[in-house]
Image (cartoon, grey):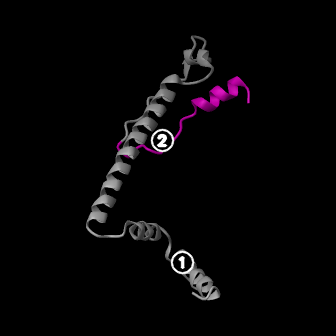
């Protein structure tokens, strides 16, 4: 892919997967300018090697924000496990229950069947 094809590819609109989920829309800088002759010329951003610096900055900042939120959520989850432990619940079993609730019922049944088979094979 040559530079011209890459710029054409980068200029095509993309669907933002986070649109409508509470995130502000990412800025989309003007990709092309129309010259007086009516032909398209490359935008000034082509001088940065074809990278839309504003778009890149926006994406990086969004990822950083999400990482911060993930850290905060992790701390909240640890607090809930601490609370459960102080209430007398076994947190290892709770983690197992949460993992099982994420799985499909067929997968759980298959795993339980195999576990039962392996236990009988070992005389447990």
Looking at this view, name the residue that lies furthest to the top.
Answer: 36
In the image, 69 versus 23, the foreground residue is: 69
Answer whether residue 124 is magenta in the image.
no
Looking at this view, name the residue that lies furthest to the left.
Answer: 87
Left or right position of 51 against 25: right
Using the rendered image of the protein, determine whether residue 124 is visible from the camera's viewpoint. yes
Mark 1 is surrounded, within 10 Å at the Cα level, by few (under 14), some (14 to 19) or many (20 or more) other residues, namely few
Using the rendered image of the protein, determine whether residue 29 is visible from the camera's viewpoint. no
* Viewer-side label of 2, 1: 1
Which quadrant of the figure has residue 41? top right
Q: Residue at x 60, y 81 (%)?
A: 114
Quick check: 101 above or below 122? above
Instruction: Calculate the distance from the C-alpha at mark 2 to the C-alpha at mark 1.
Output: 34 Å
Name the residue carrying label 2: 16
Give coordinates of residue 34: x percent, y percent. Answer: 56, 17
Give coordinates of residue 88: x percent, y percent. Answer: 28, 70
Quadrant where the N terminus is found in the figure: top right
Quick check: 64 above or below 81? above
Q: How many marks?
A: 2
Secondary structure of the residue carrying numbered label 1: helix
Q: Residue at x 69, y 23 (%)?
A: 3
Answer whether residue 6 is magenta in the image.
yes
Looking at the image, tell me whether mark 2 or mark 1 is earlier in sequence order: 2
Quadrant where the C terminus is found in the figure: bottom right
Name the residue carrying label 1: 106
């Amino acid at each position: 892919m040559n530079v011209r094809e890459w710029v054409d590819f980068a200029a095509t609109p993309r669907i933002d997967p986070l649109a409508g989920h509470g995130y502000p829309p990412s800025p989309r800088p003007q990709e092309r300018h129309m010259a007086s002759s009516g032909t398209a010329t490359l935008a000034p951003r082509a001088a940065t090697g074809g990278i839309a610096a504003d778009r890149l900055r926006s994406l990086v900042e969004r990822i950083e924000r999400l990482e911060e939120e993930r850290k905060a959520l992790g701390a909240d989850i640890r607090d809930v496990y601490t609370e459960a432990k102080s209430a007398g619940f076994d947190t290892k079993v709770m983690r197992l229950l949460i993992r099982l609730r994420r799985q499909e019922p067929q997968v759980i049944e298959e795993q339980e069947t195999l576990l039962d088979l392996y236990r009988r094979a070992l005389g447990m």
